[in-house]
Amino acid sequence: MVRSFKTVKVVCFGGGTGLPALLSGLRENKWLKITAAPTVFDNGGSSGALKDSHGILPPGDVLRCLLSLSEDEAVARKILSARIEIESAPRHTAGNLLLLGLQMVFENDYQLSIDSLGTALHIHGRVCPVSCEKSTLVANYHDGVTIKGEIQIDEKLREGTAPKSLSLDPQVEGNEALILAIKKADILCISSGSFFTSILPCFLPKGIKEVIQESPAPAIFISNILTEGMGMNHESVESMTRTVEEYIGKRVVRIVINDKVHDDAMGRYAQEDKNPTKYDKESNDPRFITGEFWQDSELARHDSRLLGSAVSKLIHELTNPSPR
């Protein structure tokens, strides 16, 4: 944990498991004022089912962020991640159902529902989804094919085809609370995660890219440990960084890269066409920050403690530049 006397406002974008890992690692740095900005265009699992049956925004990524920022994450996770197996709500987590109930209480004010649950969980920070309006992720491909839905896009990626571009249907407005947080931010962090369905969609709602472009806050990008199927075998840290920069409209100033993999686990991941994300080790790019962030040999995921330590140091350095 980095100590600082200066409060630093940081906005963290992403979804899936990558963003919660980052948030868990940053949470103990009380000098950080954290805003988590998860994507809300999921169409699978419990979240997708609630979106279809009740017309609400998918709560899954939002809930994971709330849990990761909670002062007692273990207890909160045990309670709210429990699966409710009743006839009227099969397979849903307690947390997802609670968010559904809060939206009904607060008359579909999604941000107020999230803030209320955040208060109950004593979270360190705030969760502001990228939009409070329902939409579906759309991928356009080089052969002219168009596919709708996060699950379907991920499946095509595993089969070998990456999108040429992404959009939303319908186009939606960015969350006003998030736009205000970006305007006030000192640092922007882009987490690891599903590149085409969790990371890039964060910047598609109206107003998000524009306010990032106008912000003087430097941007940090955390690269994935592994690629995501045959459709990403040609990608590198450098190429993904360029794509991120295109979607946010500004240059990334630091890139966090895992530089050690567990060989004993790679056979299993290679069968899924998931390989270590390549980067040019001879480039001497001053933006590269490398480290051993993969600790659990059974699961290719950033260790939240190690990642949080590295990113908090970067944030401190970027907001407290050394005198020349």
Image (tube, grey):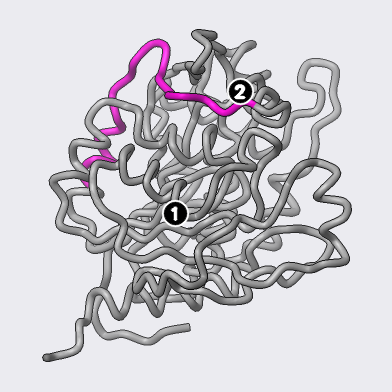
Looking at the picture, does residue 21 appear above or below residue 5? above
Where disc 1 sits, the SS reads helix
On the rendered structure, is 313 left or right of 61? left
Looking at the picture, which amino acid does disc 2 mark?
Ile
Circle 2 crowding by C-alpha within 10 Å: few under 14, some 14–19, many from 20: many
Looking at the picture, does residue 311 appear above or below residue 166? below
Residue at 39%, 20% (x, y): give it.
Answer: 133
Residue, disc 2: 153
On the rendered structure, is 236 left or right of 106? right
Where disc 2 sits, the SS reads helix
Which of the image's four quarters has the C terminus? bottom left
Residue at 65%, 19% (x, y): give it.
Answer: 152
Dot placed on the residue nearer the N-terminal end, 1 or 2:
2
The part of the chain drawn in magenta is 161-180
Residue, disc 1: 238
Q: Can residue 206 be seen in the rendering of this structure?
A: yes
